[in-house]
Amino acid sequence: MCGIVGYVGEKNAQDFLISGLKRLEYRGYDSAGIVTLAEDGEATLIRAKGKISNLEEKMAKAKRSDKTGIGHTRWATHGEPSERNAHPHKAGKIYLVHNGIIENYKELKNELKDFDFQSETDTEVLAALIASFYKDGEHPLLNAVVQALKLAKGTYGIAVVSENNPDEIVVARAGSPLVIGVGHDETFVASDASALVGHTKQAIYLNDGEVARVTKNSVEIKTLNAEPVSAKVEEIETNLAAIQKGGYEHFLLKEIMEQPESLTETLRGRIHKEEGTVRLGGPGLSEAELRKIKHLVIVGCGTAYHAGLLAGYYIEQFTPEITIETVIASEYRYRHAYIPKDAVALIVSQSGETADTLACLREIKKQGIKTIGIVNAIGSTIAREVDGGTYVHVGPEISVASTKAFTSQVIAMVMFGLTIAQAKGVRSSMLKPYIDEIAVLPEEIGKVLEEATEPVKRIADKYKTYEHAIYLGRDTAYPTAMEGALKLKEISYVDANAYAFGELKHGPLALIDDRFFEVAFLPKGDLYEKAISNVQEVLARGGKMIVVTNRDCDLAVEDVVKITTDIEIFAPILMNLASQLLAYYMTTAKGYNVDQPRNLAKSVTVE
Ligand code: AGP
């Protein structure tokens, strides 16, 4: 996520801005910038693509002793990572840094015909809009910001400065955090309290719809309707690590728990429940091109591969005459597989940098096959080399074990599949159940996380000494079992493997003894009874079964994790939350490093 910092006071603004941005590096970014103002209003704007060290190199040649300034680390959403797309954005005399997405930026841009836009960003449009209202009068900057924000739709956390008012910063928030740090003859602003630790313990957290004008010794807060707001000063948590993890002990738990929000970002502007349609602009395929697709190749590694498997099961349920092949990138890149010309390849990667997946992409492109990225990291290599794509927009995924990205990758691919089905004329009544369930999935995820956490924590403690586990599922619960087993093995080092229920009697059943515990995913539906007979086979051999199910379960098993939901089609997505939590709590019970497991990297950029 992007980061904002700002300073107005008696000390050197550049020093605070750089140190503050470094505190926010953990949030992930691809470019950074600062602007400072001298007492006479002279501005020094420095921006750089890549790491903050690149910004520091440039700053060394433009050292200033200015006492006012704002800074930003950008996680690209509109426009690829570059210096010209980096914040702060300049418009006339004003400079703006922005977190969030201005959804009506195109309409606003059309109204600003006289402005010479330099970037592809929605932020620059907001800056130009503010500048268009920036006129003399009392608190001109505050008034210009208020008038502009009344026209902007979307989410924002912003900080604005102007050459004409070098002793103040205007900040505002709607949907993206903004905190004001109160010092002695100095005031700080930031998108995340971690930037303030060590500078002040007094913080004022802006609420949505509030705007503030701050100077070195004053904070004036109002609503956009000019109602004054009394500032509530709170004590800042001074544990930096705790702040950066959003108060959670580990990034993994934070990323598991933020899936309602991250999936909401994936769906934003794409799923239209009332119309019963899905619209994706990113793949860039016409209706005719979508209609012609007869074959999907879905490529990924690890969790991305599992997401492709699960999405493939769903897509073939509602898309006629289409064959789907989900492949492991490291294998497929060396195969001599023929891909029919009426195929499209989905390239799935959270980081967008996985070497095997990238190599596979390049091999597939050589065959002239259209490639669509299902990627999280904006502007990553895979995102830039595919023909089109759908960003999952889950924000940085810091923990090595992928969780929120998996959920959003599956749904993003299902949405792509729905656009194919729509183009092929599949009855809307056939697609409506999928769209209706997807629309409420974020909320259901929140409920399940709340319901399942304690039961799963208890189960994890009960099985924390086990070194072997078998995960079992059938149909869409089978890729779910595979993903669950990977989660457990990669952070708790338990030898966990997944099998299709129907495969048990072809070998794995021989494994069952008291060294193992089993996790069985039993979604409500036609296959439930068939899976029960498999469960009985395991129990008959002394299996210690944990059942994860969204229906009543009267099985004589050790433990049941009940998923209370009306969701049926995508119940496996909700069941996977239990796997994520089980892996997390087993690992913490063992005292292992949750976020950086041994031998693994977040992005495998080497073969
Ligand atoms: C999943 O938890 C692992 N971290 C790993 O399997 C990962 O999914 C795989 O390396 C693919 O990464 P990518 O999505 O960034 O390409």
Image: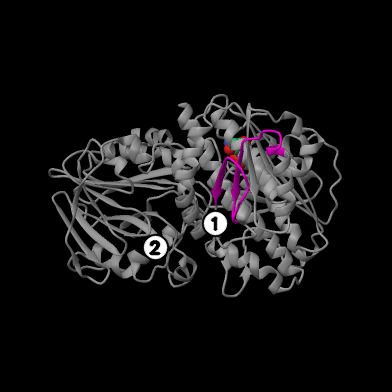
Query: Which residue appears at 47% of the width and 55% of the height?
Result: 446
User: Would you identify the image quadrant in which residue 540 lies?
Assistant: top right
Instruction: Determine the secondary structure under disc 2.
Output: helix
Residue on which disc 1 sits: 266
User: In the rendered image, which quarter is residue 493 located in?
Assistant: top right
Q: Does the stretch in magenta take in 489?
A: no
| Residue type marked 2 | Leu
Residue that badge 2 annotates: 126
**Residue 13 at what x, y percent from top left?**
25, 41
Residue 281 quadrant: bottom right
| Residue appearing at x 45%, y 51% in the figure | 450
Q: Nearer the viewer, residue 170 or 222?
A: 222
Task: Give the structural element (helix, strand or loop) at label 1.
Answer: helix
Q: Position of residue 93 (x, y in %)?
A: 30, 58
Q: Is residue 539 magenta?
A: yes
Specify the quadrant that holds the C terminus: top right
Q: Residue furthest top?
A: 599
Is residue 147 shown above or below 303? below
| Nearer to us in this view, 258 or 181 | 258
In the rendered image, the vertical position of residue 546 relative to residue 475, given as above or below? above
The type of residue carrying mark 1 is Thr
State left or right for residue 393 relative to residue 146: right
| Observer able to see residue 39 | yes
Residue bounds of the magenta highlight = 538-562
Beta carbon of the mark 2 residue lies under 8 A of ligand 1? no
Relative to the observer, which residue lies in front, 124 or 579?
579
Residue 304, can we see it? no
> Whole-percent x and y of residue 314?
70, 57
Q: CA distance from mark 2 to mark 1?
A: 23 Å
Q: Is the residue marked by circle 2 packed among few (<14), some (14-19), or many (20+) residues within 10 Å?
A: many
Label 1 CA crowd tier, 10 Å (few <14, some 14–19, many 20+):
many
Q: Quick check: 493 left or right of 183?
A: right
